């Protein structure tokens, strides 16, 4: 009788999680067996060979959907189609990178030819960059914009990388909510609270789609009685996909890229009323101290997108 390998041993051998193995099974890519006297999943030699094939394809960044198509096809036509598409994508990206390099070199020559008092002053560098960004945005709206600017915007959009996303779990906690109050009033209230001995983040801002306005939240400490007269809500906590952005125009761009990262992730999906009993919103937290903005001219913000574990697709 062929020896069966326990799920934990398979996970250790191939450096993957047991949940990933179960996910591959749920997607119909892998099969396990269970003996009558053993409750855990076990894998035979054929399953391990199939798993090795899955892992190789995933290393090539082949989607689970395409892997399913490959395994469902009796010949090699689908495999060749997927791999050829991957090669074409790599070739296209290399060509775009080369074109972007030429555009960047052109802008370097442009900057070198313009007056710039002190290249070592980070604030001046930031203002210079923002000024050029404004010129590019204005040029992008001009029908007669230079071809170089048009192509640079197209190239950078196609090459836009997903941000470094981390998944965290926030605990359920009582929070004071700004509600209909002015955000400046709420800011003055919680900014006066001594939080030197507490971990951050403690405050978040989100856009409440029901009230059509931004609301600010501040996590209350246990037993805290003075809530400034603001409404106290029960924050449900939960899983969030988080990435950092510079305040301003970068925030909506990074927020959209976090959503894209979640959509492409095989383990998580964005929280909705259909898959999450709690009403949760995208939210943000400025994590840099005021002195940082004084030195650089901008803040850094963590953007939080509520997520849940992805449920297997029903056949």
Image (cartoon, helix red, strand yellow):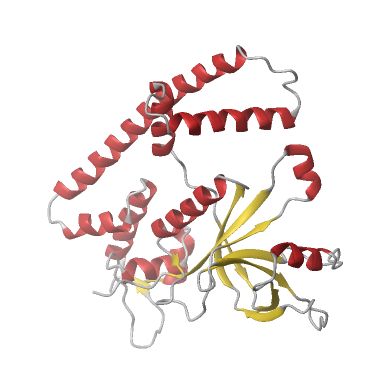
The answer to whether 283 is drawn above or below residue 117 in the figure is: below
| Res 180 quadrant in image | bottom right
Residue 85 location (% of width, % of height): 25, 41
Instruction: Between residue 68 and residue 3, name the one nearer to us.
Output: 68
Location of residue 121 in the rendering, given as x and y in whole percent from the top left corner: 76, 27
89 over 202 or under it: above or below: above
Q: Image check: 82 left or right of 224?
A: left
Q: Quadrant of the N terminus?
A: bottom left
Decide: is 178 above or below 50: below
* Residue 3 visible to an observer of this rendering: no
User: From the viewer's perspective, is residue 312 above or below residue 246?
Assistant: below
Q: Which residue is pictured at 59% across the width and 78% down the height? A: 236
How many marks the image carries: the answer is 0
Percent across and percent down for residue 293 are 75, 44
As rendered, which of 257 and 97 lies closer to the eye? 257
Furthest residue toward top: 113
Rendered location of residue 268, percent (x, y):
45, 65
Residue 293 visible? The answer is: yes
Q: Residue at x 51, y 74 (%)?
A: 210
Q: Which residue sits at x=17%, y=49%?
A: 78
Which image quadrant: the C terminus? Answer: bottom left
């Amino acid at each position: 009788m062929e020896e069966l390998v326990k799920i934990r041993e398979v996970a250790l051998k191939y450096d993957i999680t047991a949940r990933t193995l179960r996910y591959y099974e749920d997607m119909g890519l892998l099969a396990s067996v269970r003996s009558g006297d053993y409750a855990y999943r076990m894998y035979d030699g054929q399953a391990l060979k199939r798993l090795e094939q899955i892992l190789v394809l995933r290393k090539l960044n082949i989607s689970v959907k395409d892997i399913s198509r490959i395994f469902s096809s009796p010949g090699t036509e689908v495999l060749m189609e997927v791999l050829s598409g991957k090669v074409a994508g790599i070739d296209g990206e290399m060509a775009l990178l080369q074109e972007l390099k030429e555009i960047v070199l052109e802008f370097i020559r442009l900057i070198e030819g313009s007056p710039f008092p002190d290249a070592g002053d980070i604030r001046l560098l930031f203002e210079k960059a923002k000024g050029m960004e404004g010129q590019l945005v204005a040029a992008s709206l001009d029908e007669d914009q230079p071809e170089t600017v048009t192509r640079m915007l197209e190239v950078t959009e196609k090459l836009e990388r997903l941000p470094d996303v981390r998944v965290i779990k926030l605990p359920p906690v009582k929070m004071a909510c700004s509600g209909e109050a002015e955000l400046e009033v709420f800011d003055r209230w919680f900014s006066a609270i001594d939080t030197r001995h507490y971990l951050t983040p403690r405050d978040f801002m989100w856009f409440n789609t029901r009230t059509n306005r931004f609301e600010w939240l501040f996590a209350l400490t246990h037993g805290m009685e003075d809530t400034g007269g603001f409404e106290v809500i029960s924050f449900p906590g939960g899983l969030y996909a988080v990435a950092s952005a510079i305040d301003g125009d970068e925030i909506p761009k990074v927020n959209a890229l976090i959503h894209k990262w979640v959509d492409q992730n095989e383990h998580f999906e964005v929280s909705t009323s259909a898959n999450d009993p709690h009403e949760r919103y995208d939210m943000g937290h400025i994590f840099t101290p005021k002195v940082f903005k004084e030195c650089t001219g901008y803040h850094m913000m963590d953007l939080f997108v509520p997520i849940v574990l992805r449920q297997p697709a029903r056949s």
